[in-house]
Amino acid sequence: MEAIRTVFLFPGQGSQHAGMGGDLWAVSPAARALAERAAALTGMDLIGLMAAADEPTLADPEIAQVTIFTLSTALAAALAEQGIRPDLVAGHSLGEYTALAVSGALPWEEALLLVQARGRAMARAARLAPGKMAAISGLEPERVAALCAAASRDGCAVVANYNTPLQTVVAGDAGGIESVITLARAEGALKIDLLNVGGAYHSPLMAPARAELEPLIRRAPLRPPATAMLSSITGEFVADIEAYRSLLLEQVTLPVRWSVCAARLAALAQSGAALMEVGPGRVLGGLMRQISRAIGVLAACDGAALARIAS
């Protein structure tokens, strides 16, 4: 593998916010053209939603997933306009689909429509089995997993995201998550935050979404990535594309292993690679700072941010 100089990190659901993208559409013709193409393909007013929709609207999985994917890929296109391209990509949960598109492992149009289908399937699953997610900071991941097992007597509770050694996200139904939160507080968790998401993602409650997505993922035209890609499903490089297809199918019910990706990314940053969070918000940059305050992540979130990166 050639030397890795630039890494693009793509965020997942929960990074959306009102006004995301900001001035991007006015300053990047490539970004605007891509967003307009996405709007035509999905039948959604994506630029209008990003500019004017309120937080509850944007939290709807059917809207959040398409808008985050569109903005993230539009930002990557705007960076390419400036001659900035990644040597490696990685995405957190939904961001995995962005990474597939940007790496060349899945055509952009196919990835967009698959993301739209994923959002719809997960929204339907969440309506069938309402759930919650919470980020627990300050306890070892193994301890949080044990608390989930203990809370299972009160409902569904599993680890959904192994984010860093200091933050683990849990998902499940109301009874299970309330029990985990109570146990985590008793264990001395430093911080517990309920997440602004529409369901219990990466948990057994998403099984109906997995079933709905299976035929789409089975026939998706996946190919080996042209740009190196780390998978947040395993934390490993994507190599065997058919083995990866099976993992992608299970992604909506499997935990995200971002902590493994983050350890690799930290080593790359310490060797001089530039890390860029390409998408709304600064969630992934915040997770990297939990690993080491010395690791900087450039936020490529709007036109003004891109101008700073290029200067």
Image: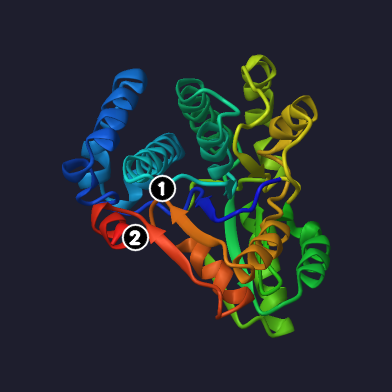
Residue 242 screen position, x and y as percent = 77, 24
Residue 108 screen position, x and y as percent = 47, 26
**Residue 261 vs residue 194, the one in the foreground:** 261
**Residue 45 vs residue 143, the one in the foreground:** 45
Against 109, is 240 above or below?
Answer: below
Residue holding disc 1? 84
Residue holding disc 2? 309
Check disc 2 and report its element: helix, strand or loop.
Answer: helix
Against 151, is 19 above or below?
Answer: above
Q: Quadrant of residue 70?
A: top left
In the image, 35: left or right of 286?
Answer: left
Ranked by sequence position, the earlier of labels 1 and 2 is 1
* C-alpha distance separating marks 1 and 2: 9 Å
Q: Quadrant of residue 192?
A: bottom right
Residue 228 screen position, x and y as percent = 64, 41
Q: How dense is the environment of label 2, judged by Cα within 10 Å: few (below 14), some, or many (20 and up)? A: some
Q: Which amino acid type corresponds to the residue marked 2 in the rendered image?
A: Ile
In the image, 181: left or right of 122?
Answer: right
**Residue 225 vs residue 208, the one in the foreground:** 225
Q: Residue at x 55, y 42 (%)?
A: 94
Q: Which amino acid type corresponds to the residue marked 1 in the rendered image?
A: Ile
Total count of labels: 2
Quarter of the figure with the C terminus:
bottom left
Against 154, is 88 above or below?
Answer: above
Against 163, is 119 above or below?
Answer: above
Q: Residue at x 50, y 51 (%)?
A: 11
Mark 1 and mark 2 residues within 8 Å of each other at the beta carbon: yes
Can see residue 231? yes
In the rendered structure, find residue 189 and report the number of the disc placed on it: none
Residue 305 screen position, x and y as percent = 30, 59
Q: Residue at x 71, y 45 (%)?
A: 1
In the image, 195: left or right of 310?
Answer: right
